Image (cartoon, rainbow, N blue to C red):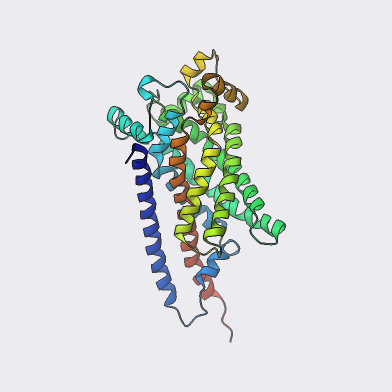
Amino acid sequence: MTDDVVVIHAAVTSLECCLLCSDRVVATLDMSQNKSKDEEPFNSDGDYESLPPHVSVTTHMTAGAVAGILEHTVMYPVDSVKTRMQSLQPDPNAQYKSVYEALKRIIRTEGIFRPLRGLNITMIGAGPAHALYFACYERMKRSLSDVIQSGGNSHLANGVAGSVATVLHDAVMNPAEVIKQRMQMYNSPYRGLWDCIRTVTYTEGVGAFYRSYSTQLTMNIPFQAVHFITYELMQEQLNPHRHYHPGSHILSGAAAGAVSAAITTPLDVCKTLLNTQENIALSSMNVSGHLTGMANAFRTVYQLGGLSAFFKGVQARVIYQMPSTAIAWSVYEFFKYFLTKQQLPQEHEARPRPL
C-alpha cells in the first residue's frame, strides 16, 4: 500500500467500527420496542422520518454537539498535517511529500502527541458550534421546504439552511480555528492554549480572532451549501424513504465532504494564511503589520506560488474531510434516531387513553 492509502485505510476502519456499533445499538433498540404489543404500534421508521415536528431543539443540539466533537477529533492529526502543507514558504524541515510521510516525521522528530496540539480548543469550540449548526439547519430546512415545495425535499431549502447555519457555526468556531492553526504550525512559539490566547490578545488585539471570519464565511457558505445539497441528493438515491440507515448516512456524508472540500480548497489556503500570519511568507512580500482581508490574502497567495498555491494541502483536506463528514452525519443521524426512540414511546404512554 502507498503512504496515503494507509491513512485512508485507517479512516475507513474507523468508519466501519462506527457503523458496526450503530447497527448493534439499533438492533437492541428495535428489540426493546417490539416487546410492547398491548399498546398502539410504534412505527420507528415513520416516527424517525417525522422527527422535526416531534423532537425538541435540545435534541438536535445534543446530537449536533456530539457529532461535531467526534468529527473534529477522530481525524485531527490529518488536519494538523493539512495546516502545515498549506504553508506558503515552509521551513525545510516541514516540507512533506504525503500525509502519511508527514505524520510519521512529525511523530518521530517532535513527539507522538505533536499532531494533537490544539485539539483541546477544537473540542471546546466544536460542541457549541455544531449544536447551533445542526439545530438551525433542521429548523430552517423544514420551514423553507414547507414554503418552497409544500413540505417536500427542496435542494434550494437545503442549501439556504446550510448557509445560514454556517454563519452561527463560524461565529463560535472562528476564534478556536485561529488558536488551533497557530498551535499546529511548525516551530509554533506558543507554550500552550492559554499562552496562545494571551499572546495573540496582547500583541494583535481581540480582532485577531475574527480576522479571517469573512474569508471563513466566504469559504464555508459555499462549502456547506454544496455539502448539504450533495448529502441530501445522495440520500434521495441511497435512502429514498429516509429511514435510519447507517450505511447510507456514511456514504452520503463521505461523498458530500469530498466534493465540498475539493471545491473550496483555494479559500481554505487563504483562511490559513490569515489565521497563522505566516511570518516568512509575509516578510518576503514586504508586508508590514498583519495581513487582513480576503482580497489581500488571495493576492499574496498568488504572488508567492501562482495558481498551484491555491491547492496546497488539497489531498490532506479531502482525506481529512471525507471520514470526518461521514462520522458527523452518521453520529448525528444515530443520535436523532436514538433520542427519538427514547422520547416517542414516553409521549405515547403519557397520552390519555379512551374510556
| Picture residue at 56% right of the left edge, 50% below the top | 230
Judging depth in this view, the residue of 16 and 204 nearest the camera is 16
| Picture residue at 56% right of the left edge, 43% below the top | 169
Q: Is residue 161 left or right of residue 109?
A: right
| Percent position of residue 104, x then y | 31, 33
Farthest-out residue, front? 1
Judging depth in this view, the residue of 332 and 247 nearest the camera is 247
| Total numbered labels placed on residues in the image | 0
Q: Is residue 79 above or below residue 158?
A: above
Farthest-out residue, bottom? 355
| Picture residue at 33% right of the left edge, 38% below the top | 2
Q: Is residue 298 left or right of residue 85?
A: right
Q: Quadrant of residue 21?
A: bottom left
| Percent position of residue 86, x then y | 46, 28
- Residue 65 visible in the snapshot: no
Q: Is residue 50 above or below residue 171?
A: below
Judging depth in this view, the residue of 245 and 29 nearest the camera is 245
| Picture residue at 29% right of the left edge, 34% below the top | 112
| Percent position of residue 67, x then y | 46, 50
Q: Quadrant of the N terminus?
A: top left
Farthest-out residue, right? 147
Q: Is residue 115 above or below residue 236?
A: above
Farthest-out residue, top? 286
